[in-house]
Amino acid sequence: MVSRKRIRQNKHYRKRNRNISFVEKTVNQPLKKDTFKFKYKGFDLRNKSLILMYICSSGFVLFYLIPFILSIYYSLINNAFDKKFVFFNNYIQVIKNQYFQLALKNTFEFTFTSIGILIPVSFVLSITIVSISESMNFVKPAFFIPMLLPTASVIIIWKILFGDYSYINAFLHNNTGRIPIYLLFLWKNCGYNIILFSAAFLSIDKYIYEAASLDGVNVFQKHLYITLPLILPTVFFVFIISLVNSFKIFKEVYLFYGTYYPEQNLYLVQHYMKNHFDKLNYQNLTAGAIIFAIIVYVIVAIGYKIQGKVASEAWY
């Protein structure tokens, strides 16, 4: 006869085995994802991140894509009232317009001149700052101050420095031209570019420079043949950011000169568009905007092509 003690032990072991098997089944069972189903007209959204993606896409479609399509529509009609299709007549008129040609010429002169100065200056300053202190803790806050300051307050200082009765204007015999705008653009955007270049420099392995020093490479050759090829994507990104920021200079030009009809060498594309907007001449406004967008797209596409070609041949 089995003792009571033996029966209790067997019950204990069976209970423990049941608990262990339950735990094993629970552990080995695949975890259920935190998903939910939302079906709407054939779409099955199984992840919350897709919802956020659709929200962001809807914002892009609502505020960018649809207005751009409407701009194309307005550029193909005679005016906003009759709405008769004239197809490409508005584009031909805008291209032949002497003020649009002047605005386009001044805009790209300012853009490429300012970028041609901004990128080398930012590059050299970032190299200098990184060589002094890699952490850059003592200068990091100063880089963003120009971008954080209100434009109107900066323009007041600029008028004091370059106004009609300033010493600098008197020294230049009232012939400052675009110099104040160039200096304002450089001062405002140089710090941000330095941050980007410095981050790219610090990502380069120091052993590469040490090996180059052992081979007798000087400082200029190091940055020309080592630094520049390694940070080429950053250089291209800085170029794109600077290109976009150069097209935002209209506000500074208007506040500094105080008119929508400045001197001929300061008449930009934004002045042309603003004046046609005030006249409700939407067909010429949209046609000029689309022509300008196509030109910028071609410039960026050429930049991508050059960047890819240079990057592929940098080490060959």
Image (cartoon, rainbow, N blue to C red):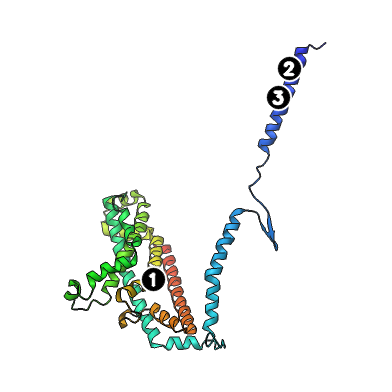
Q: Is residue 118 above or below residue 201?
A: below
Image quadrant in which you'd find residue 239: bottom left
Three-letter amino acid code of the residue under disc 2: Gln
Image quadrant in which you'd find residue 221: bottom left
Mark closest to the chain's N terminus, 3 or 2: 2
User: What secondary structure is found at the residue carrying circle 1?
Assistant: loop
Mark closest to the chain's N terminus, 1 or 3: 3
Observer-nearest residue: 174 or 13?
174
Observer-nearest residue: 200 or 286?
286
Separation of residues labelled 2 and 1 (CA atoms): 84 Å
User: What secondary structure is found at the residue carrying circle 3?
Assistant: helix
Q: Residue at label 1?
A: 248
Q: Which mark is residue 9?
A: 2
Three-letter amino acid code of the residue under disc 3: Arg
Front of the two marks 2 and 1: 1
Mark closest to the chain's N terminus, 2 or 1: 2
Q: How busy is the neighbourhood of tag 3: few (under 14 within 10 Å), some, or many (20 plus)?
A: few
**Quadrant location of the C terminus?**
bottom left
Q: Position of residue 35 (x, y in %)?
A: 64, 50
Can residue 120 be seen? Answer: no
Q: Is residue 275 above or below residue 32?
A: below
The answer to whether marks 1 and 3 mark residues whose Cβ atoms lie closer than 8 Å is no
Observer-nearest residue: 103 or 311?
103
Q: Position of residue 279 (x, y in %)?
A: 44, 84
Q: How busy is the neighbourhood of tag 2: few (under 14 within 10 Å), some, or many (20 plus)?
A: few
Three-letter amino acid code of the residue under disc 1: Lys
**Left or right: where does residue 42 sit relative to residue 247?**
right
Q: Is residue 104 above or below residue 60?
A: below
Front of the two marks 1 and 3: 1
